[in-house]
Amino acid sequence: NYIDAIIGLPANIFYGTSIPTCILVIKKCRKEDDNILFIDASKEFDKIKTQNKLRQEHIGKIIETYRSRTKIEKYSHCATLQEIKDNDYNLNIPRYVDTFEEEEEIDIHAVMNEIKELEAKRADLDKQIEVYLKELGLVI
């Protein structure tokens, strides 16, 4: 196993292409060859005009994570070869780095009450508009 790490980069970082890209770090003489580090740096960028740019701190975070091979929630994961085998040798970063953001729960009753309040306010405003129209002699 020569693949040491797979680093996902943001979309639109290179001129001429807007697709997200990745860096494959390949090492022939690895200390530990039973794992691959996955880093999802796709959200680490600054938008400058129409191009996305990596700042020095983004690059530093990628390098530090690569050197320490640490697991950072929603950013990096060091997968064993067995884990990769279990995923049919698919090296797609989202298979190993979970970036799922759970949606906040919606209180249906509070939303329904808010809708009722807004409808009542709208009805009051409709009545007020009707009074103004009558005063102006513009009865509908």
Image (tube, grey):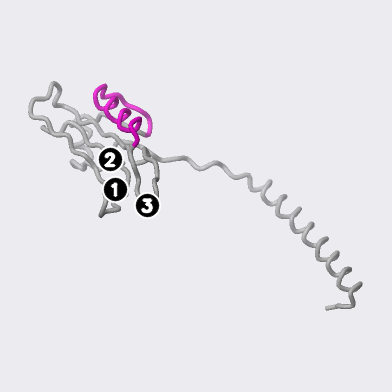
Q: Is residue 114 above or below residue 1?
A: below
Residue type at mark 1 is Pro
- Name the residue tied to disc 1: 20
Q: Are marks 3 and 1 in contact (CB under 8 Å)?
A: no
Give whichever of 6, 96 is nearer the camera.
6
- Name the residue tied to disc 2: 8
Q: Are marks 2 and 1 in contact (CB under 8 Å)?
A: yes
Q: Are marks 2 and 3 in contact (CB under 8 Å)?
A: no
Q: Residue 13 at x, y = what percent?
A: 30, 46
Q: Is residue 56 left or right of residue 91?
A: right
Dot placed on the residue nearer the N-terminal end, 2 or 3: 2
Dot placed on the residue nearer the N-terminal end, 2 or 1: 2
Q: Residue 104 at x, y = what percent?
A: 54, 41
Asked if residue 63 is among those painted magenta in the image, a careful observer would answer yes
Residue occupying the point 59% across, 45% down: 106
Q: SS at mark 1?
A: loop
Read off the magenta span. 55-74
How far is the residue under mark 3 from the one under mark 1? 15 Å
